[in-house]
Amino acid sequence: MNKLKKKITLAKGKWEELQDNKDPVIYVGAASCGRAAGALELVDEIERYISENKVNARVIQVGCIGPCYLEPLVDIKMPGQPRISYSNVNTKVLGHILKSHLLEGQPFARASIGNFSRETFMDIPPLFEHPMLKPQVRIVLRNCGIIDPEEIDHYLATDGYQGFMNALKMTPEDVIGAVRQAGLRGRGGAGFPTFKKWTVCRNSPGEQKYLICNADEGDPGAFMNRSLIESDPHAVLEGMLIAGYAIGASKGIVYIRAEYPLAIERLKKAIAQMKEYGLLGNNILGSRFSFDIKIKEGAGAFVCGEETALIASIEGKRGMPRSRPPFPAISGLFGCPTIINNVETLGTLPNILRNGAEWYTRFGKEGNRGTKTFSLVGKIRRSGLIEVQLGTTLREIIFDIGGGVQKNFKAIQTGGPSGGCLSEEFLDLPVDYESLASAGSIMGSGGLIVMDEDTCVVDVAKYFLDFTQKESCGKCIPCRVGTKHMVEILERITHGEGNPEDLMTLRNLGDTIKKGALCGLGQTAPNPVLTTLRYFRNEYLEHIKDGRCRAVVCKDLIEYRVIKEKCTGCQSCVRVCPTGAISGPRSEPHNLDPTKCIKCRSCYEICRFDAIAGDAIVIRTAEKRS
């Protein structure tokens, strides 16, 4: 342990030197979100610029700080000045930023969103006073977007592995006790108390025990686990060390989907660094604790997020759930006691062991302690990765942090495809495990999808159920047959071929699947349908009785037309129409040929004058039914 302490001292010295830099330091947000927005092109342009202008500057790639809608993000720290953050940077704006900030010594204020100090600097406010960041409580995400995720010294300099070193000074039972006192519940979705699983596993007989990090994040729109690993991999790995020590495991496995290449690359580098620093192997830091970590890449099957299917996949079998008991904590991987913890659960542990259980209980609410990370996406002004205290209301998340929606709010899907679709009446619902369950939804791993008036909830329910139906392993009849039948009914309804009896059939099927499915995937699959039936029944009836889709989404129920009185002839719709269905000279009302229209919705979305209507076929369908 003394060797590691010396390395920590050196790392903190390097970190302080970086903060008190003598030369400019340029940070580029280069997690997947930043890269998708062009961050790597900016890195190349920055290196070219500083080389041509003979500027002695250091370029560091960091992870995701959270507001993905502002990517690419570039920060510049000049000597003696705070770090300034710039958003939505492209190569054109970058030139102005670099010239102004590096060569002229003046921050390019027009493109900046904040500085990393607590005070306003040259009219640039503190970054963490930004409306998306200010209401958050960053515990798990404390290093994300701040440090270089590929540099272990950066992690050590910010008190990394201090939680593990504290754990080694305690007995495993005391570590479990601290986690119990902290009130940590599994962040993978079910919210089961972490200490209970650990206690069962530690007390289960067997010389070999395993710890598995479940990084098989497969929910559409969810990226919390990926972002944490890409931005701060050592936080997750330190959590694995703590958990492994507590349960008596000697082997750890990170099960991560192969579709996360950057996360895998950074995990591999971090594990190699741990071995170099004596944090993996036999008798770690002079203790009696021996532990090693390996990576297992999954093939991307959603069902492998379920722990027994995940175990089967690691064993080389087809990823299919099995009935329980026995639970994995008693008989898991290769028949040995096994704990499967979510990425965020593990990423939370170092903070608890470093700062103490009592400190952690200051956050959240009784029975729901701590914070939770969420991916906030959909029809929201500020999309990205957030972290809030458990008990924060949906209204605070959507409107205070997310900035609200551009059109009228309709619903929010919590818990991913297995979650529920909650209406406006639930905006003041606190986000905790019990409150969401009482509304018919779940916490899930943390995906939040916001919808506005242009969203058809029937279409959304069909989309999510179709996803889970296709991802079903097919082992049990309720899930295999029931979800397929439900999807077929929803397809009929969106085609205008449904009948009122379908709603009762959907409800009965959903209840049967929830009670009879083998695993959590099947048991929660009907949630989107059941909650939309419960809170948006009128929209189902409109599809069935009136042949109307109020959101103008279901193609078989709409036919687009131009409202001549509103059309200004701006030709925006002409430019986006992929089939040439819209024509007409500039400044004159246009025409739309329904025989050429593929109902792609592009003209409807781009028109600023509400001159495109999607209701012509509604009238004919209603007349036919009458």
Image: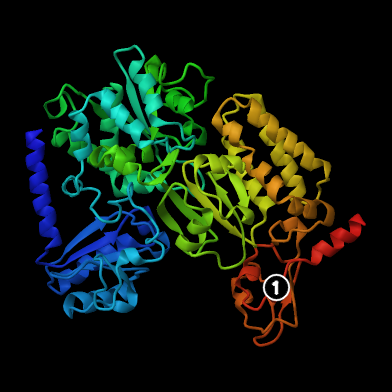
Query: In the image, is 39 to the left or to the right of 57?
Result: right
Residue 356 vs residue 558: left or right?
left
Left/right placement of residue 97 relative to residue 609 reads left
- For the N terminus, the quadrant is top left
Looking at this view, name the residue that lies furthest to the right.
626
Residue identified by numbered label 1: 612
Instruction: Name which residue lies at 40% across and 25% down.
Output: 197
Callout 1 amino acid:
Ile
Horizontal side of 510 relative to 3 (left or right) equals: right
In this rendering, the answer to whether 563 lies above or below 453 is: below
- Judge whether 143 appears above or below 175 on screen: below
Residue pushed farthest bottom? 587
Is 226 located above or below residue 605 in the figure?
Answer: above
Which residue occupies 15% across, 67% down?
A: 24
> The C terminus is located in which quarter?
bottom right
User: How many numbered dots are placed on residues in this image?
Assistant: 1
In percent of width and height, residue 404 lies at 52, 64
Secondary structure under tag 1 reads strand
Q: For residue 584, what is the image quadrant? A: bottom right
The relative height of residue 474 versus residue 80 in the rendered view (above or below) is above
Residue 114: in sight, yes or no? yes
> Residue 456 placed where, x, y %?
67, 56
Q: Is residue 262 visible to the viewer in this orientation of the structure? A: no
Seen from the viewer's position, the closer of residues 123 and 452 is 123
Among the 4 quarters of the image, the one containing residue 37: bottom left
